[in-house]
Structure formats: structure tokens, C-alpha cells
């Protein structure tokens, strides 16, 4: 987690320096980023290999491929051909076993941040899915409420309702004062 945040901070710094044409700093952040990504790759190798060893059987994996194609169509081909795909298939199976809706988790994970600049979108999704599925799975009642709810927000302006006093006065009469 700390390494992820550090990499993101260096990427942001590199973009900031590039926008201001600070070429030496851009080069320095580029070298720093290469070192951090190498450290990340080394740290991530063992957990990803452990997940990949538990890859689900082909029918389950094929079902996950379809879920990815439906949930994240713009990146689906890149994700399913990524070397981290077996680990992602395992993470999806683990989430489903824990009672989560894998398609919903995939959409949530993909919507957290763009995948366009990820070196390994499947690897990014593995970590996001694991973080999301660590939360308790929604109860059947919560799932039913989620299915009924809509995510559309009505942004049409509504006329303000006039405020009403506790005892309405007929029009044309001055308000009564109570003693």
C-alpha cells in the first residue's frame, strides 16, 4: 500500500515537472519511478504467484472472462491476456466464494481510477478486488435494495416550496397576535 502511494506520488510529481518544463526533475522522477516499479514487481511477485497457483478450473475462468468483457469492455482484451490474469481469476473466485457479486466488484474496482496508464491492469484489479472483497459481503436484504436502487441522480431544478406557518392565515388578513 505504501509503495503504491509512493509510485502515484512520483507519477504526479513527474507530470507536474513536465508541465512546467523542469527537464532535470522529470528525468530524476523517471529514474525514481523505474526503481520503485522494480521494487513493486519484486514485492508483488510472491503474492501473485500464490494466487496464480490456485487458478480456478477452465469453465469458471471462462465465466470470469465473460464477466470482465461485460463489466470492463474497453480494457477486457488487455486484462485477459495480461500475465496476472490467473491471479485475477482467483481473486474473482475468492470474492464470489465470500458472497460478493464479482461483476459489481469488477465495476467498482475499474471505476476507482483509470486503467489506461496501468502497466498491468489485471494486477491493479487484483489488488483493488482484494481490498474491496475484504469488506463483509452485503446481506441478501442489502443486495435486494441495491438491485432496486438506481444510480441516476435527478438534477432538474425544482421550484422552491413556500414555507408554511403552523397556522395558516387567510389571504388579505393581517396576522393575528396572540397574547
Image (cartoon, rainbow, N blue to C red):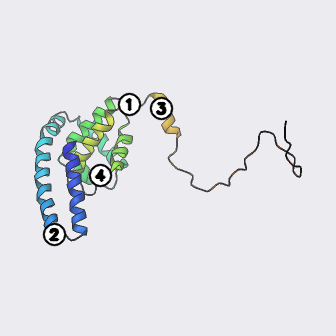
Q: Nearer the viewer, residue 27 or 173?
A: 173
In the figure, is residue 97 to the left or right of 154?
left
Q: Is residue 59 visible?
A: no
Label 3 with label 2: CB-CB less than 8 Å? no
Q: Secondary structure at mark 2?
A: helix
Q: Nearer the viewer, residue 26 or 165?
A: 165
Q: Secondary structure at mark 4?
A: helix
In space, the residues marked 1 and 3 are separated at their CA atoms by: 9 Å
Q: Nearer the viewer, residue 16 or 137?
A: 16
In space, the residues marked 4 and 2 are separated at their CA atoms by: 35 Å
Mark 3 or mark 2: name the one nearer the start of the chain: 2
Mark 4 or mark 1: name the one nearer the start of the chain: 4
In space, the residues marked 3 and 2 are separated at their CA atoms by: 52 Å
Q: Please name the residue that numbered disc 3 is placed on.
A: 142
In space, the residues marked 2 and 1 are separated at their CA atoms by: 48 Å
In front of the other: label 3 or label 2?
Answer: 2
Bin the neighbour count of mark 4 within 10 Å (Cα to Cα): few under 14, some 14-19, many 20 and up: some
Q: Please name the residue that numbered disc 1 is placed on.
A: 137
Q: Which residue is the extreme one toward the bottom?
A: 21
Q: Please name the residue that numbered disc 2 is placed on.
A: 23
The correct choice, above or below, for 135 with respect to 68 in the image is above
Mark 1 or mark 3: name the one nearer the start of the chain: 1
Mark 4 or mark 3: name the one nearer the start of the chain: 4
What count of labels does the image hold? 4
Q: Quadrant of the N terminus?
A: top left
In front of the other: label 4 or label 2?
Answer: 2
Q: Quadrant of the C terminus?
A: top right
The residue under the point 77% across, 39% down is 166
Label of residue 76 in the image: 4
In front of the other: label 4 or label 1?
Answer: 1
The residue under the point 34% across, 32% down is 135
Amino acid at each position: 500500500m505504501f509503495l503504491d502511494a509512493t509510485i502515484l506520488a512520483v507519477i504526479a510529481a513527474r507530470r507536474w515537472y513536465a508541465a512546467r518544463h523542469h527537464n532535470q526533475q522529470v528525468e530524476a522522477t523517471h529514474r525514481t519511478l523505474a526503481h520503485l516499479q522494480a521494487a513493486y514487481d519484486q514485492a508483488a511477485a510472491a503474492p501473485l504467484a500464490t494466487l496464480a497457483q490456485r487458478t480456478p478450473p477452465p469453465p469458471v475462468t471462462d465465466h470470469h472472462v465473460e464477466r470482465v468483457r461485460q463489466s470492463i469492455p474497453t480494457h477486457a482484451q488487455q486484462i485477459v491476456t495480461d500475465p496476472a490474469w490467473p491471479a485475477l481469476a482467483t481473486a474473482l473466485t475468492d470474492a464470489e466464494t465470500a458472497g460478493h457479486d464479482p461483476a459489481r466488484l469488477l465495476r467498482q474496482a475499474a471505476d476507482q481510477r483509470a486503467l489506461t496508464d496501468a502497466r498491468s491492469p489485471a494486477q491493479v484489479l487484483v489488488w483493488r478486488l482484494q481490498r474491496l472483497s475484504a469488506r463483509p459481503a452485503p446481506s441478501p436484504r442489502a443486495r435486494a435494495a441495491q438491485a432496486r436502487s438506481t444510480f441516476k441522480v435527478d438534477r432538474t431544478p425544482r421550484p422552491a416550496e413556500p414555507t408554511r406557518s403552523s397556522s395558516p392565515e387567510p389571504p388579505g388578513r393581517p396576522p393575528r397576535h396572540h397574547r
